[in-house]
């Protein structure tokens, strides 16, 4: 997981590698971040009951097989379908550095990771973007957040 700042205005937590179906699924904090999102979504009072039933199958393990039967792939797929995302592939891709077109993909829709960041900001407006301060934050996500906080050497 790493920060992405667009035009010095928009801050989102980006992925280092794709997560989900056919994704690299190789960065612990990336996979944990996405899994955690769906765990929170399963419990959110404003959630869609049909999607929440799928989301409840997701656990924060930091691993994803990338196959159709993986609970995280199922959660991503149903979420993309429900939002009528232009790319329904069960995968959340990283925003490429210097992405042409900014934070959007086909059809004017935002990269899916941007949508997740927006939901985190909505659910935790007084804490965002400090994910590490949200109760239940996975250790690998907390470390990724804390690693980018500037440090001033003592002395």
Image (cartoon, rainbow, N blue to C red):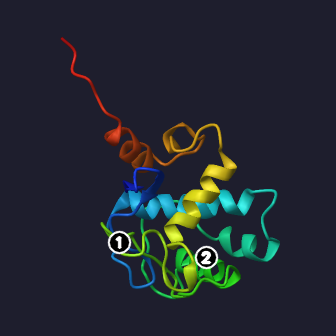
**Mark 2 vs 1: CB contact within 8 A:** no
Q: Position of residue 15 (x, y in %)?
A: 39, 63
Residue at mark 2? 75
Q: Which residue is painted at 57% across and 87% down in the image?
A: 86
Badge 1 crowding class, 10 Å Cα cut-off, few under 14, some 14 to 19, many 20 or more, is few
Horizontal relation, residue 77 to residue 20: left or right = right
Query: In front: mark 2 or mark 1?
Result: 1
Q: Which label belongs to residue 147?
A: none
Horizontal relation, residue 154 to residue 89: left or right = left
Badge 2 crowding class, 10 Å Cα cut-off, few under 14, some 14 to 19, many 20 or more, is many
Q: Which residue is painted at 37% across and 47% down in the image?
A: 144
Q: In the rendered image, which quarter is residue 62 located in?
A: bottom left
Q: Position of residue 24 (x, y in %)?
A: 33, 76
Horizontal relation, residue 47 to residue 102: left or right = right
Height in image: 152 above or below 31? above
Height in image: 11 above or below 133? below
Q: Nearer the viewer, residue 117 or 141?
A: 117
In this view, the residue farthest toward the left is 155
* Residue 59 visible, this angle: no
Residue at mark 1? 99
Q: Position of residue 143 (x, y in %)?
A: 37, 43
Could you tell which of marks 2 and 1 lies nearer the N-terminus?
2
Instruction: Give the distance between the C-alpha atoms of the residues marked 2 and 1, in whole angstroms.
Output: 26 Å
Name the element at disc 1.
Answer: loop
Quadrant of the frame with the C terminus: top left
Quadrant of the frame with the N terminus: bottom left
* Residue 101 visible, this angle: yes
């Amino acid at each position: 997981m790493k920060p992405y700042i667009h035009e010095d205005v928009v801050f989102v937590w980006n992925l280092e590698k794709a997560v989900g179906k056919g994704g690299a699924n190789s960065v612990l904090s990336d996979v944990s971040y996405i899994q955690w999102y769906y765990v929170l979504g399963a419990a959110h009072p404003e959630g869609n009951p049909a999607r929440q039933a799928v989301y409840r199958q997701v656990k924060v393990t930091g691993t994803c097989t990338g196959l159709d039967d993986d609970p995280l792939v199922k959660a991503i797929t149903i979420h993309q379908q429900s939002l009528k995302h232009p790319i329904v592939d069960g995968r959340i891709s990283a925003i490429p550095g210097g992405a042409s077109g900014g934070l959007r993909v086909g059809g004017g829709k935002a990269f899916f990771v941007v949508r997740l960041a927006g939901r985190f900001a909505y659910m935790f407006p007084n804490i965002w973007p400090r994910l590490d301060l949200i109760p239940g934050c996975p250790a690998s996500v907390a470390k990724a957040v804390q690693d980018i906080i500037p440090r001033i050497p003592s002395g």
